[in-house]
Image (cartoon, grey):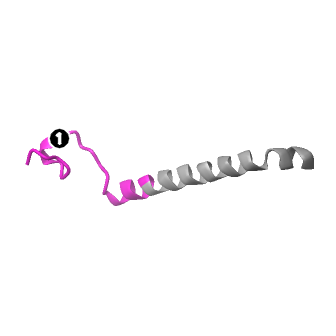
Amino acid sequence: MLTWLSANGGTLLVALSLLAAVAAVIRSLLRDRRRGKRRCGGDCGSCPGCGDR
């Protein structure tokens, strides 16, 4: 087991780092959604990010 860990340590470190980054992004999106920051109602005319207004 120790041999396998030492042979794959770099791969495991990168995989865990990517997993942590994805989890942080998902957590941030969920928090923003609960606070009402990122919500699409389907009405692009009333969208604050719409450039047509």
**Looking at the rendering, which quadrant does residue 32 occupy?**
bottom left
Q: Which residues are magenta?
A: 29-53
23 part of magenta stretch? no
Front one among 51 and 9: 9
How many residues crowd around disc 1 within 10 Å: few (fewer than 14), some, or many (20 or more)? few
* Residue named by callout 1: 43
Residue 48 magenta-drawn?
A: yes
Q: Is residue 1 visible?
A: no
On screen, residue 19 versus residue 41, left or right, reads right
Residue 31 position in % (x across, y down):
42, 58
Is there any visible trace of residue 50 in the rendered image? yes
In-image side of 47 versus 13 (left or right): left
* Amino acid type assigned to the residue bearing label 1 in the image: Asp
Q: Is label 1 in a helix, a strand or a loop?
A: loop
Tell me which residue sits at (45%, 57%) in the image: 28
Dominant secondary structure, magenta: loop
| Residue 8 location (% of width, % of height) | 79, 44
Please state which of residues 42 and 4 is positioned toward the viewer in this rendering: 4
The answer to whether 5 appears left or right of 25 in the picture is: right
Rendered residue at 52%/56% (across/down): 24
Q: Which residue is situated farthest in the left direction here?
A: 53
Which residue is drawn at the image coordinates 60% and 54% (left, top)? Answer: 20
x and y percentages locating residue 27 in the rendered image: 49, 55
Residue in view at x 31 percent, y 57 percent = 36
What count of labels does the image hold?
1
